[in-house]
Image: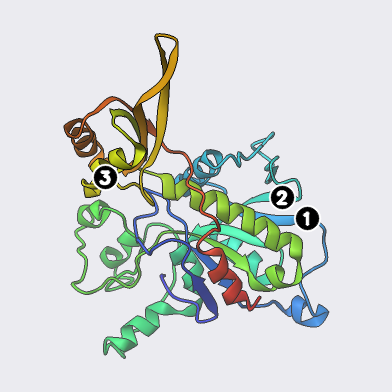
Amino acid sequence: MLASNPNLTKCPFFPTRYVPISRSFHITCSVSQLQSAAEVVNGGVPERNEIRLGLPSKGRMAADTLDLLKDCQLSVKHVNPRQYVAQIPQLSDLEVWFQRPKDIVRKLLSGDLDLGIAGFDTVSEYGQLGPKFMKENGLNHVSFSTADGALEAAPAMGIADAILDLVSSGITLKENNLKEIEGGVVLRSQAVLVASKRSLIQRKSALDTTHEILERLEAHLRAEGQFTVTANMRGSSAEEVAERVLSQPSLSGLQGPTISPVFCKRDGQISSDYYAIVICVPKKALYKSVQQLRAIGGSGVLVSPLTYIFDEETPRWRELLSVLGL
């Protein structure tokens, strides 16, 4: 069942782009405000030195998560596939625990994990969004039952009149003679990075590790689909070349083009008749940008994909600190 948790505070790590979690992987950051009975008794998170990150143990999300972390230079070293504990060498104080997505959320709530990656639908499940959705839409005489496995068979077996399930393409629904009810989208899900608010507040090491993970993730995902374009252009000065480049709006780059002299030696003299232009362009505008560079005198155009884009400060870090009250 897809539901929401009123005790979860969602801190947008990236502009909200809901996508099927089985097809692509984007990260948002949610901070859990719940605490377990043990935490209430002890007045804090369970005492331990290591920081624990829960990752999905099976399925498409598990593979996508490992690939994403690897792309961020945070490769998970899993020596024995039968073991549920692994390491990320770049984060020496971090332990990786492979768990089912529902168990990741449960163990975040109990304090056994500090961080986790799971589907937003799973994170939201504990707040009964299904009944809330029905009530808000005037369906007051609906009873709910939960089931694991293939929910699509429930209507044909007479167990249910409708199902509430996570779908990607909808093909399985059609093959079982089911169709989506118009206006029946309860929640659009994507992968989310979730943290125990109490852990981040009470343990500086957990907060520092979260900061590094956020920086690496955001820098990599921001660079996704971006290319560095370098070209040479003849000109009388850097300012004159910049004027030509900036006459084309799509060539402005992130904050503007980088223009520097290209030095060569002619007749024993050092001269700089050419200038190198470096800009960042999105994939969809790549060929158009190359054409525009040529049109204003650019030559020797080089194109390379970007791996990271680090800002002066991770844009969502301040938002996270605000959520934490720090």
Q: Position of residue 61 (x, y in %)?
A: 47, 49
Determine whether, in the image, residue 249 is placed left or right of residue 142: left
Q: Judge the density around disc 3: few (<14), some (14-19), many (≥20) Cα neighbours within 10 Å.
A: few
Quadrant position of residue 116: bottom right
Amino acid type at circle 3 is Glu
Residue nearest the viewer, comparing 192 with 175: 192
Q: Position of residue 312 (x, y in %)?
A: 54, 55
Q: Earlier in the sequence, mark 2 or mark 1?
A: 1
Q: Quadrant of the N terminus?
A: bottom left
279 vs 326: above or below: above
The residue located at (56%, 64%) in the rendering is 317
User: What residue does disc 2 label?
Assistant: 95
Residue farthest toward the top in the current orientation of the protein: 267
User: What residue does disc 1 label?
Assistant: 50
95 vs 124: above or below: above
Q: Secondary structure at mark 1?
A: loop
The residue located at (42%, 75%) in the rendering is 145
